[in-house]
Amino acid sequence: MDLCLFLSLKRRMMKDHVSQEMRAAKKWPDNWQFLTQDYRELVKDQFPIKERKPVMPPTPLRIPEGIPLNQLVEVHPSTKPVPKTTSALIGWRSGEEKLKLERYGKYANPKGALIKQLNWPIEGIE
C-alpha cells in the first residue's frame, strides 16, 4: 500500500512539474523575448544616427598641398646599426642624447617626493 501511495504522489509531483514548465514556456516570450533580439535593433529608434561632417584641422595645422612630406619632416639617420633581434629593437635609438624621450631628466616631479612633503622619517616608510 505504501508503494502505491508513493508512486501516486511521485506521479502527481511530476505532473505538476510538467504543467509548470508548460506554463512557463507559454509565458516566456511575453517576458523575455527581448533577450533574443539584437540590442542595436531594439534601441535604434531611441538613438537616431547623426550625420557628421568631416572635421578639418585649423589652417595652420594643415599640410600645404604640393609640398612633399619629406621636405616637412626630417628623419635623422641612426648612428647605430639596426639590431638583429626584435627584443634589441626596444629603445635602441633612445640611447642617443638627441633622440632621448626623457628630455627633462628621468622623472619630472617639481614638488619632490611625497615623503618630504609629509615630513615622514625615512625609517617609517617600510
Image (tube, helix red, strand yellow):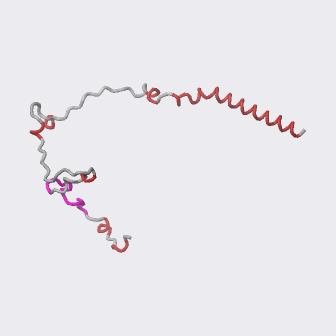
Please state the total of marks drawn on the protein image.
0
Instruction: Report the predominant secondary structure element of the magenta stretch.
Output: loop
Relative image position of residue 85 (x, y in whole percent)? 26, 51
81 relative to 9, above or below: below
Relative image position of residue 10 (x, y in whole percent)? 79, 36
Name the residue at 18% across, 55% down.
Answer: 100
- What is the residue that sits farthest to the front in this orientation? 84
Name the residue at 25% across, 53% down.
Answer: 88
Q: What stretch is highlighted in magenta?
A: 97-111
Relative image position of residue 75 (x, y in whole percent)? 13, 45
Q: In which quarter of the image is residue 56?
A: top left
Front residue (pair 19, 95) = 95
In the drawing, does residue 9 fall left or right of residue 24?
Answer: right
Magenta-drawn stretch contains 109: yes
Magenta-drawn stretch contains 117: no
- What is the residue that sits farthest to the right in this orientation? 1
In the drawing, does residue 100 fall left or right of residue 49?
Answer: left
Quarter the C terminus occupies = bottom left
Name the residue at 15% across, 37% down.
Answer: 61
85 relative to 111, above or below: above
In the drawing, does residue 44 fall left or right of residue 117?
Answer: right
Quarter the N terminus occupies = top right
28 relative to 118, above or below: above
Front residue (pair 99, 41) = 99
Name the residue at 23% across, 54% down.
Answer: 91
Relative image position of residue 76 (x, y in whole percent)? 12, 48
